Amino acid sequence: MFSFGGKKAEAKETQKDLLGGKGANLHGMTRLGLPVPPGFTITTDVCKYYYAKNENYPSKLKKEVKDALGKIEKQMKRKFGSKKSPLLVSVRSGAPVSMPGMMDTILNLGLNDDTVLGLVEESQDERFSYDSYRRFITMYSDVVLGIHSNHFDSALEELKMAKGVEEDTELSADDLKGLVKEFKQIVRQNGATFPEDPMEQLWGAITAVFGSWMNPRAITYRKLNQINDAMGTAVNVQSMVFGNMGDDCATGVAFTRDPSTGEKKFYGEFLINAQGEDVVAGIRTPQPINDDSKTESSSHLKTLQEALPQSYKELVKVYQLLEKHYRDMQDIEFTIERGKLFMLQTRTGKRTAAAAVRIAVEMVKEKLISKEEAVLRVQPAQLDQLLHPCLDPNFEKQVIAKGLPASPGAATGQIVFDPDTAEQWATEQNKKVILVRIETSPEDIHGMHSSEGILTARGGMTSHAAVVARGMGKCCVAGCSSIKIDYDAKELHVGNHTFKEGDFLTLEGGTGEVILGEVPTIRPSLGGDFGELMTWVDQCRTLKVRTNADSPEDAQVARDFGAQGIGLCRTEHMFFEPERIDAVREMILADTLHGRKVALEKILPMQRSDFESLFQTMEGLPVTIRLLDPPLHEFIPHTDEDLHYLADKINVDFVRLKRKRDALHEFNPMLGHRGCRLGVSYPEIYETQVRAIMEAAVNLWNESKIKTTPEIMIPLVGHVKELEVVGNSCRKIADAIIEGTPIKYQIGTMIELPRAALTAGEIAEYAEFFSFGTNDLTQTTFGLSRDDAGLFLKDYMDQKIYTTDPFASLDQTGVGRLVQIGLSEGRAARPDLKVGICGEHGGDPESVVFCHQIGLDYVSCSPYRVPIARLAAAHAALSEKKEAKTKKKASKKKSAKKTSKKTKKKVSKKRVTKKKVAKKAAKKKVVKKKVAKKKVKKKSKR
Amino acid sequence: MFSFGGKKAEAKETQKDLLGGKGANLHGMTRLGLPVPPGFTITTDVCKYYYAKNENYPSKLKKEVKDALGKIEKQMKRKFGSKKSPLLVSVRSGAPVSMPGMMDTILNLGLNDDTVLGLVEESQDERFSYDSYRRFITMYSDVVLGIHSNHFDSALEELKMAKGVEEDTELSADDLKGLVKEFKQIVRQNGATFPEDPMEQLWGAITAVFGSWMNPRAITYRKLNQINDAMGTAVNVQSMVFGNMGDDCATGVAFTRDPSTGEKKFYGEFLINAQGEDVVAGIRTPQPINDDSKTESSSHLKTLQEALPQSYKELVKVYQLLEKHYRDMQDIEFTIERGKLFMLQTRTGKRTAAAAVRIAVEMVKEKLISKEEAVLRVQPAQLDQLLHPCLDPNFEKQVIAKGLPASPGAATGQIVFDPDTAEQWATEQNKKVILVRIETSPEDIHGMHSSEGILTARGGMTSHAAVVARGMGKCCVAGCSSIKIDYDAKELHVGNHTFKEGDFLTLEGGTGEVILGEVPTIRPSLGGDFGELMTWVDQCRTLKVRTNADSPEDAQVARDFGAQGIGLCRTEHMFFEPERIDAVREMILADTLHGRKVALEKILPMQRSDFESLFQTMEGLPVTIRLLDPPLHEFIPHTDEDLHYLADKINVDFVRLKRKRDALHEFNPMLGHRGCRLGVSYPEIYETQVRAIMEAAVNLWNESKIKTTPEIMIPLVGHVKELEVVGNSCRKIADAIIEGTPIKYQIGTMIELPRAALTAGEIAEYAEFFSFGTNDLTQTTFGLSRDDAGLFLKDYMDQKIYTTDPFASLDQTGVGRLVQIGLSEGRAARPDLKVGICGEHGGDPESVVFCHQIGLDYVSCSPYRVPIARLAAAHAALSEKKEAKTKKKASKKKSAKKTSKKTKKKVSKKRVTKKKVAKKAAKKKVVKKKVAKKKVKKKSKR
């Protein structure tokens, strides 16, 4: 147990494990010489003792508490339990990590029928005193005696009805006196007694704090957040100070810099003659503490600087000291009691992304923090705010529905229900439109392009709409199941509302909100601070960041955002452009190899020119191109109506078209005739694509000496033989085209099926690189369709079966284990295997950290998430560095002998470096059979 | 090099690795004192030397061959290369394992322009001699000189045209003489010379045999069958004997028992004055060797017993000796040259399943073999023949299409295209029908029940049609992609044929053949031999065999087939019965919990009575019941037409019905809202099912003291939390129902998702048993929909990407690895975990062996495959026993030190015994946290 007060503190702020977060900062501020009301902290060790010893306290504790109380009494010149100048205290819990679910605070402890009179005398406010008393009884009864506050609330309501008043504040001091009596009666009726003895009150409160450590909510919270149950909580007992004892009293909160913009100015609000909760409650309008804090609506109010200039001056000194000491922007709480300033709390202040960036960069310039620290000050997920437009926060929005936050940003526009209208309205009539679909398909791309945002009723975080929208950097709310869409009537129903084509709606892609009407949006600009921070970020990280981009436009955006190459270029989007889709359909309809080849010849030059532009844009950086992946039926319209239209357009018999469509129909297209399975059945398709890729590379070399090394990626491999057959046929084509040029290429594969990960050692014999397609790998590992999961994912989140959407954040236990198996066995078979991931997880900070930890070469994500991934990669590298340092220190201290099993396990989980596996692989190779050797020889000749 | 001849052989028949299979048996027969034409075997060691030494022979070989030839000449009183009584030899390859793709045989080696005259003199048949000569030139040129036989064939054809004849036999001796000259000319034109020197001929042939060991076909075959390239082949050189030198000559083949029925009788065919190939060629009708061998069409022909009684007597002695020696039914070849009997070959004879069973059982009774040997004599896959009707083999069938052999047996009937017609025709008009569908769905069950067989155009080996048909023991040909079905016209198109409703077709489910018209079928009966053999089978095996059965009828069939419990009872089939489906639909349509509960109350008593019957049938055996698995939309009609009908029937608004159907639609139902996900979203469904199960168990106890221990299985668990949530809710219901009775139950889960296998350790904490659902596990591990795979599986088999259909035989590399991970981590967490598999693989012999090897407790398969699984399990146990014995011997011989790494690896792959893992688990448990301990305590109280 440690006391603090009067500029002295028995413990240090670094002893957070022992004092809890709150306690540590109270000791810290005290040591800094700041005016902190005196108090003491009962440590987490006592909590541990309490639970270890069958809920008993150490024998000395009673005396220690008494002594500590005595110190407070001395400093405050008050006496605990005395009728004259009574000492009142607050009792708060404070665990080493911030944790909801526990008992929080009991204020004004020490009040009873006697001491309340002392309070009346001091405050000269009988009403305030008895109001505090009845609140204390309610709070104490609820958290210590276990009598639900409902009982007291109804008594209060009855009294108000009897008095014919509406507000609590309308009750008189006498009313409240009566209420205190009645409250005590209620306590008795519930089989308890309200303790008049303040010491008994105190021990009750302490025990309640410790008891709340093991209440179900707290246990659940710790379980979900993987917090150790053994950690325990501390209890802080601190003298009360009053900001509401007259006009020389005040209370307020302030930030050491502007939390919205990050500007270096002191910023805060306060109220004269008030308690802390009044500032937040909103009954009175808080006043600005200084001119810098004035807003339009508060500019007429008196500032603290004007009202209590001496206290303000002191506060300024305090805030400057605190920021310098904690080396970060602080969020502080203060109370002024009769002209004397007291500091109640300081903690690191929450801030917007823009503020975080600005503060971090400016603090480096002020030499307060290092560049590495600056990098760690910005959370990767925060950056999303910076990179997309956002809603004007001052506008009062009316949310009518909520879907999944599929792609961030805000968009406002007129709703349309089909992609053609979207395109027409946007391009011909210059309207801003929101495309509303039950779900989107590749045929909708042009409409999505023309829209400000996309809203779908179906699909999850990695549904087509979500993936494409993120790729375009467009706002999207997906899987909004409460909206019903009627395509025929061109109407959207939600609750009792009906919206027609042309009605205005607004989407908030970061929260999934669908908002009524038009809401003004703000387009943030990426200032110089952002750019500066990102150069530091890149100095910190080792994991590379590529992008998923299908067009030169997307590629350029990503390059500007710092992408180090393309990790996934999906070629199917190249088939959907209006002038090509007909040739594609011609190919699909052809019943002979010849017919397919004729159609493919038409597609070849177009794809070649696509690749030429792409390679040009990405000059000097690697480009991974995935060969055609989706099942062919995706290129054929699904409804009979659309099919009739197509039949007329391409002059093909409708019945024949329909028969083909039916023949191509699949029950589970996700598990169907797609990926390399197309390459096996129709080698000519992949051959044409490889031709287009390699001819583009050769042309660029011949024309402008741009040297490209395309990485050709075969999708959906599940068996080494697939890669062998398809890959060999690709190599044959490619080798013939590049002959006589210095162009090189690689052939690799997506690892997106569990079987591919499980047989990665075999597959790596034929693959020069792996890219984990964690979207599909998640689908197959969980047996969960991302397009259908929306129907029940909510039930799963509600019942806490999943804590996060496995399509948004990589499931490290299951899917991650497969990734690790694939990585280590792949590298064992081919030590120089290049390995990355290109699923949506590549842009999720937690997943990026995982990718760094297991030792991938790169992550690839949509252009707008590239900065996020870069920052997350830097965080991962820095935390690894820190861990290594800690370990080094620890190992120096400990004797080398004591290497526990646990640490070994941790280490083995860590980065599989290429060197290590190379050794392993060398061992393995020795036992390989002759035939295998021959194969290797063949390959090395190439 | 080892010689044989004159009752002496230099090597033994056990030296198969050195002599090859053919050589070993020639030495063996010689040692038995049988009249084998003399010869010698060049060993596989020479082959190894040949490849190790850059295709050179050991220096001594030349002399050894010459000496060995000398021995033959002496015994045969002929001379190699002599004009008078020339010695002719055959040269044959013979590897230790039977292997197609290699050079097989060169006959009559030693013929040239001189020696042919000697042959003429001896045979007194010029035409025969020159015909042999020109055949020898063709064969030799083709396999030794590399001149394709086409060249010779066209010369022959031209000659026949010039002579105006149709058949080779119409050419005269002079014609053939001329042809020999022309053939030699052809050899010269192709840049080679036909060697006149017999010794040169011999060395050419020997080198050709060794050369063929490394030809591409042989290499591929070995690769596919995992045969070691280093094994090498032997070469057999043997004196020719002639069955065609007059009427005291003959040649024939015989079986020591009837290969069709297994009856113990000598059975064979022969021809007087003929060569071996004439018996097979079918130009002359072969004669029966004795009265026992006479058939209807051969009863008028003279037997060998009558024609050459002395030789026949000798042959009888020989066959009896051979069968006694080899202790199995033999397939023998013999030639009689001028009254003297020669044995050319003996080998284990191929036989039907019925014969295999009868021979095995009778040989035990004759004390020829042990019971264990008898068990090994019958191949599990063969049993299929025994358990299903088959086509009359004497009927000449016309195959019009081929699909997948989805469910064995044969069926003939009139085709219909919808289940209602099938039912109507079968029940009202007593017609035999074949149900033809593009694919089947649960709504077709009644039609499938009424049909003799099912034919589908879509779907793989584990499509709905295939699985259900196998369950019913009905013949099914699935995924027959060459047929086009037109439901509207009620027509089936295949090639140019069109078949209308009512036309006759026949299906062979064991081969996948679709046959024109009616073919008579034979229904085999399971005789006493079968029953006797199966009791021995059960004595050998340790792996239990359960069945997948949904109804008391299926359960009874399986019990009769020896099933030791139900491993999978799919409850969804209980929802499809006509009187229930409406209540099920009412439940689905209900928008409120109350509405669903009302509908479920109607279903409860029906399901309860289902379970009562099932438990009664399976009295004393365990029954695993899977809770509802398929997505709810499977219970709602898919077409608007059917939906209209339903709307009228259940008096629900069509639009509402349609909206519900659309809302339930899924893109990938396989990965959709099914399995325990239904239990999470609609707990009331599972609760009703658990209620029905447990009430049934309690009723049976109260009424007839039958004690059942239901095993309740939660499907599609992928995350331990799913099982925790759903399982706990089931336990609550179940515990309440069984209170006061001695009934117990278990709750377990299907492991059918990769993630479940990968997190089996976590899941086993909540599961009392695991059942690997390898159908779905294969689908998700491969990312392959079994309903859609039919579209491209053929391409995969053609290109040898898959060597077997992964839905038919368990993929041990990928899926098997997951099963092993799941098993070992599950058992580590819960040592007494019961583990089985219930996918279709449970009835596949190879997969059953795998299940035994890794240490599963049981396999569960469709009723008709139960005997197959039992036999496969016995084989697995016996081969393990044998391996253990061999190892024991080997380890005795070797010093204990030399334990190679390889064996260690093998051993570690072996059975994970419960004891072993219990030890591991005990270690692990120690480090578990407090909370986990509490959980365990709670459970053990139950």
Image: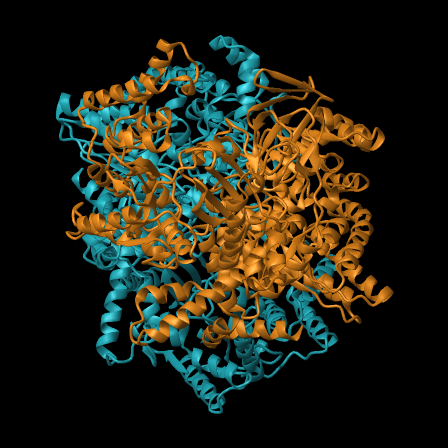
Chain colours: A orange, B cyan
Query: Residue B130, located in which quarter of the rendered image?
Result: bottom right
Q: Is residue B232 visible?
A: no
Residue B74 % position (x, y): 41, 84
- Nearest the camera: B880 or B89? B880
Residue B126 % position (x, y): 59, 69
Residue, x 31% and y 17% (percent of image)? A155
Outermost residue, right side: A703
Residue, x 22% and y 51% (percent of image)? A67
Q: Is residue B128 visible?
A: yes
The number of numbered badges drawn on the structure is: 0
Q: In the picture, which quadrant includes the C terminus of chain B?
A: top left
Residue B448 % position (x, y): 45, 26
- Nearest the camera: A136 or B924? A136
Residue, x 38% and y 61% (percent of image)? B332
Query: Residue A480, located in which quarter of the rendered image?
Result: top right
Residue A272 % position (x, y): 49, 34
Q: In the picture, which quadrant includes the N terminus of chain B?
A: bottom left
Answer above or below: position of A539 versus B492: below
Answer above or below: position of B804 versus B477: below
Q: Is residue A474 left or right of residue A120?
A: right
Q: Is residue A522 left or right of residue A340?
A: right
Query: Residue A799, located in which quarter of the rendered image?
Result: top left
- Nearest the camera: A708 or B524? A708
Q: Is residue B287 left or right of residue A117?
A: right
Q: Is residue A777 left or right of residue B926?
A: right
- Nearest the camera: B218 or A896? A896
